[in-house]
C-alpha cells in the first residue's frame, strides 16, 4: 500500500461536533436560513476540516508568507492539509542546473508537521514555471531527448528523496493533455477549435515525446515508493479530455506507476451564457461527478486539488460588464447567495462520493490572496470561502451547514 496519510486524516482529526444547527438552504439562489458572517461571533464558526472529518481532509494552497502571516490562525483552524502554490515547482527548487534551494519549501513542510497537516507536493513536471535551461544546450539549441530525460530524472530524484516520508502525495505530471487545433497547438477555451484531444505540444513533448511522462513517474516511484503519485489536470468535466487522460493513465497503470487522479476544479459561478462553445458550458455537478466515478473505477484515488469558484462567467467581452468585472462593493447579497449555492451543490456531491475522494484542497486560503486576482488586467475575484478580511462568507456556511 502507498502512504495512507490523507485517508488516515479522516480518523486522526478531532471529530466534528454532532448536532450542529440545521440550516435551510432555500431556492435556486440558496438563501441561507441561519449562520452567516453577520450573525456568528468572530472565530466561533465550526472548523472546516473538523466538520469534514468523516469525509476527507480539507487542504489549502499556501505561498512563502501566507502560512505564517495573518492567515496562519485561519489556516490552523480550518485546514489539515496544505500544498505549496509555487514553492515546490521546478523554477523555485532548481532555478539553475544543479543548484537546489529547499529553504522556503522546508519551512512550509515544517509548519505542516508542527500542526499535524498532511502535505501534497506540486508539481514535479509542468510545461510552465520550468526554467529554460532545462530544454536547451550551451548554444541554446534544443537538447537531445536523452539529456532532457536525465535532467528530469535528476530533478525528480533529488526533490522526492529530499521530502521522502514528509510529502504524502505528489502531482508528478501536471496538465500534459489538452485540446489541440489542427496545427497541433493548444486550442484554448473555445471547444469548436479543438481538432483532437491528446498530448500538449510543450517542450517536454516536442523533445521527449510521450516517454517523458512514463520516465517522470518511474523516477518518482523509485525515489519514494510510499508516496502516492498523481496526474493532475483541469477541465475535468469534459468527457473527451477524460478519455485522452485515461489512455495515458492505462500505460502508467501497466507498470504500477500511478495511484491517483488530481482534479483541479477551478470553477465559475455559472457556465458561460453567451459563448455556447466555451468549455465551461459543460461545467456541471453531474459532469464532474461522472468524471470522479470514472477515474475511481480505474482503481485511482481522486483528489480535488485546486478548488476555487470564480465570481465570473467566461463571457469575456460581454456587454454585461458584471460578467467579467466587479468591485467588492458590487458583490450584492443575491450574488453572494448564488456563489454559496454553487459551492453547496459541489460539496453535496463531494460528500456523496467521499469514499472515492481522498482530499479536497482549495487553491488559496482567503480572497485577499488568490491567483485569480493576479492577472495583468487587475481584475479582482472572490473565489474562496473566506473574504478579504479573513471572515467566513456565506459560501463557508453553505458547505458546513449539513
Image (cartoon, rainbow, N blue to C red):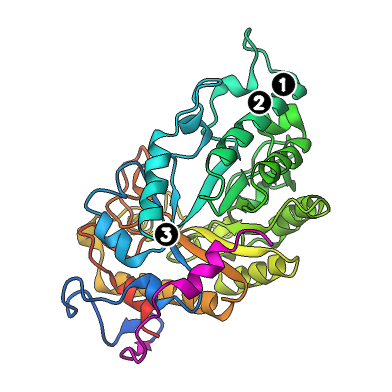
- Asked if the residues shown at circle 2 and circle 1 are in contact, with their CB atoms under 8 angstroms apart, the answer is yes
Badge 1 crowding class, 10 Å Cα cut-off, few under 14, some 14 to 19, many 20 or more, is some
* Image quadrant in which you'd find residue 241: bottom right
State which region is magenta: 1-26
Is there CB contact under 8 Å for labels 3 and 1? no
Q: Which mark is residue 147?
A: 1
Q: Quadrant of residue 156?
A: top right
Q: Is residue 45 left or right of residue 231?
A: left
Q: Name the residue under label 2.
A: 151
In this rendering, the answer to whether 94 lies above or below 229 is: above
Assign the C terminus to one quadrant of the image. Answer: bottom left
Q: Distance between the residues labelled 3 and 1?
A: 37 Å
Residue 60 falls in image quadrant:
bottom left
> Does the magenta segment cover residue 273?
no
Q: Is residue 375 left or right of residue 70?
A: right
Please say whether residue 299 is visible from this viewpoint: yes
Q: Which of 314 and 22 is in front in this view?
A: 22
Mark 1: which secondary structure?
helix
Query: Residue 174, can we see it?
Result: no
Residue 256, position as x, y percentages in the image:
78, 54
Where in the figure is residue 235, as x and y percent of width and height?
59, 56
Exactly how many numbered labels are in the figure? 3
Q: What residue is drawn where x is 30% and y is 70%?
A: 336
- Tag 2 secondary structure: helix
Amino acid at each position: 500500500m502507498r502512504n495512507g496519510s490523507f485517508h488516515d486524516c479522516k480518523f486522526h482529526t478531532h471529530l466534528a461536533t454532532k448536532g450542529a444547527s440545521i440550516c435551510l438552504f432555500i431556492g435556486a439562489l440558496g438563501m441561507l436560513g441561519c449562520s452567516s458572517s453577520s450573525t456568528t461571533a468572530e472565530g466561533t464558526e465550526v472548523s472546516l476540516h473538523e466538520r469534514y472529518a468523516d469525509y476527507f481532509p480539507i487542504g489549502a494552497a499556501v505561498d512563502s508568507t501566507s502560512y505564517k502571516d495573518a492567515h496562519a490562525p485561519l489556516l490552523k483552524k480550518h485546514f489539515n492539509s496544505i500544498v505549496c502554490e509555487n514553492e515546490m515547482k521546478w523554477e523555485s527548487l532548481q532555478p539553475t542546473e544543479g543548484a537546489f534551494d529547499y529553504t522556503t519549501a522546508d519551512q512550509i513542510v515544517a509548519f505542516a508537521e508542527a500542526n499535524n497537516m498532511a502535505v501534497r507536493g506540486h508539481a514535479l513536471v509542468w510545461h510552465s514555471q520550468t526554467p529554460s535551461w532545462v530544454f536547451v544546450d550551451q548554444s541554446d539549441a534544443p537538447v537531445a531527448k536523452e539529456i532532457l530525460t536525465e535532467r528530469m530524472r535528476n530533478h525528480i530524484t533529488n526533490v522526492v528523496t529530499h521530502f521522502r516520508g514528509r510529502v504524502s502525495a505528489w502531482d508528478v505530471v501536471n496538465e500534459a493533455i489538452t485540446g489541440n487545433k489542427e496545427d497541433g497547438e493548444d486550442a484554448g477555451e473555445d471547444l469548436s477549435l479543438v481538432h483532437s484531444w491528446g498530448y500538449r505540444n510543450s517542450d517536454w513533448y516536442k523533445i521527449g515525446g510521450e516517454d517523458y511522462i512514463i520516465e517522470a513517474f518511474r523516477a518518482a516511484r523509485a525515489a519514494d515508493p510510499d508516496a502516492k503519485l498523481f496526474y493532475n489536470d483541469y477541465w475535468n468535466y469534459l468527457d473527451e479530455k477524460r478519455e485522452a487522460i485515461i489512455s495515458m493513465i492505462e500505460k502508467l497503470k501497466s507498470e504500477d506507476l500511478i495511484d491517483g487522479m488530481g482534479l483541479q476544479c477551478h470553477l465559475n459561478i455559472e457556465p458561460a451564457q453567451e459563448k455556447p462553445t466555451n468549455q465551461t458550458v459543460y461545467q456541471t455537478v453531474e459532469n464532474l461527478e461522472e468524471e470522479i466515478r470514472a477515474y475511481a473505477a480505474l482503481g485511482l484515488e481522486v483528489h480535488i486539488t485546486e478548488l476555487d469558484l470564480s465570481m465570473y462567467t467566461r463571457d469575456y467581452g460581454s456587454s454585461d460588464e458584471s460578467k467579467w468585472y466587479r468591485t467588492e462593493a458590487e458583490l450584492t447579497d443575491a450574488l453572494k447567495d448564488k456563489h454559496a449555492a454553487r459551492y453547496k451543490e459541489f460539496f453535496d456531491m463531494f460528500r456523496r462520493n467521499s469514499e472515492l475522494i481522498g482530499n479536497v484542497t482549495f487553491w488559496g486560503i482567503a480572497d485577499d490572496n488568490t491567483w485569480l486576482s493576479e492577472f495583468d488586467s487587475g481584475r479582482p475575484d472572490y473565489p474562496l470561502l473566506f473574504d478579504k478580511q479573513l471572515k467566513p462568507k456565506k459560501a463557508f456556511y453553505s458547505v458546513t451547514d449539513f
